[in-house]
Amino acid sequence: MKILSFMNIERASALVTWLFVSSSALYYAFSQYGVSSHRPWLIVAAAVGLALCFSVVTRRDTSLPSWRIPLLIVMYLLAVGSLLLLPYSYLAIYLVVWSALLPYYLGWRKCLAVSVLAALPLGVIHTFYWQDPYAWLTAALFWTFNLFAMMMSNVAIKEKSAREKSEALNRQLTSAQQLIHQAGRQDERLRIARNIHDVLGHHLTALTIHLQVASHKAKGAGEDEVKTHVDQCHSLAKLLLSDVREAVSDIRENAPLDWQQAVRALFKDLPRPSLQLSIADNVSIEDVTTADILLRCVQESLTNTIKHTQSAQLQVTLDKSEKGYSLTLQDEQVPTAKTIQLGNGLTGMSERIEEAGGSVKFSFNKHGFFTHVLLPEPV
């Protein structure tokens, strides 16, 4: 089932339509049939029922998922019932609003078939019950309205899906660029370290050997003063060689990737959820593949949080132990489901982690959906 994501203005426009249709119908119903008649009061009940069903069916969160399809059916029955209670053909506008909801729950081909069924009650009821000679023409006109409403909803769904995919890809590209840039800097540091070690280290080693030879020759020639200066140069050369080796080791060992920066790039300009990031002091990621796997886990969790919940924040915690890197992901949506169904995203996450020799666990807790990733350090 596709999850509705109505903007407030769209829901408001539908409720304004409901208000005008319902208020005008009630005005004419009470004027025509009087307060003592049951018809106006049944219309009141139908109008209120339609509003309540609409408010639940179009909720932006994932609450009451099992109620939405039954309530959508109830909306249809109430709309058809209103056509039986009053002879006003414009009450079919209820069915137009109902038709606009169908693409969020049915495929487009099914919507086309249902659109015909949605228009039939108006023609049948007004022809045989209200004796309207133009009922089928009116029904055909309202069918075009239903079809137009479905098409506009379908276009809105596709545009929203395309926009979300584009934004997700842009965030993924931005975070990947962060890692690539840092990996490039890391490679440059290693290249410089190798050059220092291979070139400068080689020359200093040769200089040390030549100074040692010069010291021996000066000693054999009885040049004590020269030997003293040569020994001093020899000591300085050995000290400089030691410093160079220490600097090279420092460059090699202290080139971690800024994983935090890449994670924050995923959440940039998102209205929700906000990022609650906690990285232990002992965490240092130097392997690009490891950083990318952990980053993709955060990305998939973020995508699921946006798509399936209304959570205001996502907690990301990264720690390190003897077993490797421990990544936990926690949203704040109180779970309504009891079982976990692994979609393509979570399945891909599991496969990626298992290929790297790690493990992942998905579960629901009292706060929401919880993911724990354990990834060993690369050998």
Image (spheres, rainbow, N blue to C red):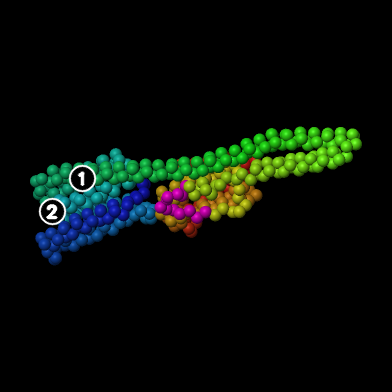
The residue range painted magenta reads 266-277
Residue assigned mark 2? 87
Please rate how many residues cluster around mark 1, counting C-alpha atoms within 10 Å: few if below 14, some from 14 to 19, many from 20: many
Please rate how many residues cluster around mark 2, counting C-alpha atoms within 10 Å: few if below 14, some from 14 to 19, many from 20: some
306 w.r.t. 217: above or below: below
Q: Which secondary structure, mark 2? A: loop
Q: Which secondary structure, mark 1? A: helix
Report if residue 303 is visible in the image. yes
Q: Looking at the image, which is closer to me, 328 or 159?
A: 159
Percent across and percent down for residue 244 are 71, 41
Q: Amino acid at mark 1?
A: Phe
Please give the name of the residue rendered at 40% of the width and 42% of the height, measured from the top-left corner.
Answer: 166
Report if residue 74 is visible in the image. no
Q: Nearer the viewer, mark 2 or mark 1?
A: 1
Q: Amino acid at mark 2?
A: Pro
Q: Quadrant of residue 56?
A: bottom left
Disc on res. 145: 1
In the image, 372: left or right of 211? left
Percent across and percent down for residue 53 are 29, 56
Q: Looking at the image, which is closer to me, 343 or 277?
A: 277
Q: Looking at the image, which is closer to me, 228 or 362?
A: 228
Please give the name of the residue rendered at 63% of the width and 48% of the height, measured from the top-left corner.
Answer: 323
Percent across and percent down for residue 124 are 16, 46
Residue 32 sits inside the magenta stretch: no
Total numbered labels placed on residues in the image: 2
Percent across and percent down for residue 160 are 35, 45
